[in-house]
Image (cartoon, rainbow, N blue to C red):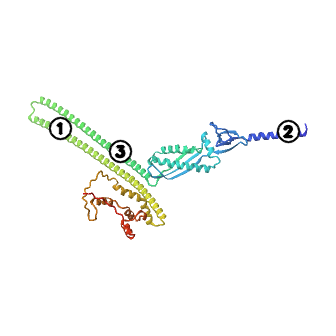
Amino acid sequence: MGTNTIILLVVLGALLFSLVIWFFSRYKKCPSDKIMVIYGKVGKNKDGSSRSAKCIHGGAAFIVPVVQAYEFLDLTPLSIPVDLKSALSRQNIRIDVPSRFTVGISTEPSVMQNAAERLLGLQLAEIQELAKDIIFGQLRLIIATMDIEELNTDRDKFLEAVSQNVEAELKKIGLRLINVNMTDISDESGYIEALGKEAAAKAINDARKNVAEKERDGAIGEANAKMDERVNVSKADAEAIQGENLAKTEIAMSNAALREKQAEALRIATSAEKIQAAKALEEAYAAEREAEQARSAREKATLEADVIVQTEINKRQIELEAEAEAEKIRRRAQGEADAIYAKMEAEARGMEEILRKQAAGFAEIVKSANGDADAALKLLIADKLEDLMRIQVDAIKNIKIDKVTVWDNGNGGGNGKTSTANFLSGLMQSVPPLEEVFALSGLTLPEFLGKKAEEKTEAAEENNVEPLEAEILEPEE
């Protein structure tokens, strides 16, 4: 084997080794935080059309030299601040909706294809601006279909509508919505603040009502406890008195038995002893009667005290309920007054905006008339002359005359005309002439539209021409 053969083999080995290294260098791996987009000749779709790109997320692919190339799409999430100002709600009230959206390139196959076709080669800042424009437009559309009450109280519904509409539009360019964070919603007219005040007033009223109810329950419980105490004390006193009476009765019976035995034993006792025994019995009966009267008086006083306490409790309860109801009515009236004020203020702002637009339009007309306000006013009136003439014609347009019967004896008035001619002339003069309408507007008819009859007569006399007159045939007798 010669030297040349060895050199040739070494060169071929080096070329083969370089070819293997270059071949493996064309095998590209895709990181997990990126999408590898292979473009060029990448195959065909199911319908036979050529594919614009092939997207790979996670994995690797061989890049065919010359006919294929590749780039990466970054999956890093983009945080987009969206400070929406003066968005018009369904109630025609402008509100501010500051929010922050987090978006990123989607890894769904169909959406990745959209990203490859529309976002490949763009920087993250450019993608962020594109997504921001889409979000702004969709937010305004969503807010225009909702009331302020829904935006302020039902945030879940609002966020769901935002997620559906915004994500549907973002998918068209290959993005997906990751998160939506809405901060405090406000409006220029103070309507949301008024709603908050109304809710706070309602909560305060409810709390005061609960406190009044608890105080009422406490007063009733305290009165019941006092009543039970007095009833139990009175019952104990009655039982004690009853025991005393029973004891006295037993003593009296014992004394009577003793006296009876003594009377039996001492039949010969003197009448004085009998008189003393009778007095003792009388005193015993008097004492019992006084005890009964004292007990009746005590029970009567207890019953009256119970009635008075219950009456005072009912009176205090009615007063508390009346005060709570009055406070509730006052708060409701205050809330309604605030709402009416906010509504009237919004309507006044709308009317002010209309007047400003009209003033700006009139200023443009004056500017078109080289600053001549009188000429601008004539332009406006001339624009409305067609409507004015239509109103004049409509004044007699709808007069329907089915049949007119005229009895005319042929005698005219002082002007040389018959009664029929005078009637027709008066009917036509009831409509203001065109020239008078123009004169009231500060305008003058062009000469080619005609002149007044007097002017035509004077012109005919100057030219020695007889003016034309209309004749009305009079009926023969």
Label pair 1/2, CB-CB below 8 angstroms: no
Quickly name the residue at label 3: 214
Return the residue nearer the eye: 256 or 181: 181
Mark 1 vs 2, N-terminal side: 2
- Occupied quadrant, residue 217: top left
Label 2 CA crowd tier, 10 Å (few <14, some 14–19, many 20+): few
Q: What element carries label 1?
A: helix
Using a 10 Å C-alpha cutoff, classify the residue at mark 3 as few (fewer than 14 neighbours), some (14 to 19) or many (20 or more).
few
Q: Is residue 212 left or right of residue 67?
A: left
Q: Residue 31 at x, y = what percent?
A: 66, 42
Say if residue 224 shows up in the picture. yes
Answer above or below: position of 464 versus 289. below
Can you tell which mark lies on residue 288?
A: 1
Question: Which tag is nearer the camera, tag 1 or tag 2?
Answer: 2
Res 45 → quadrant: top right
| Cα–Cα gap, marks 3 and 2 | 106 Å
Q: Which of 246 and 126 is in front in this view?
A: 126
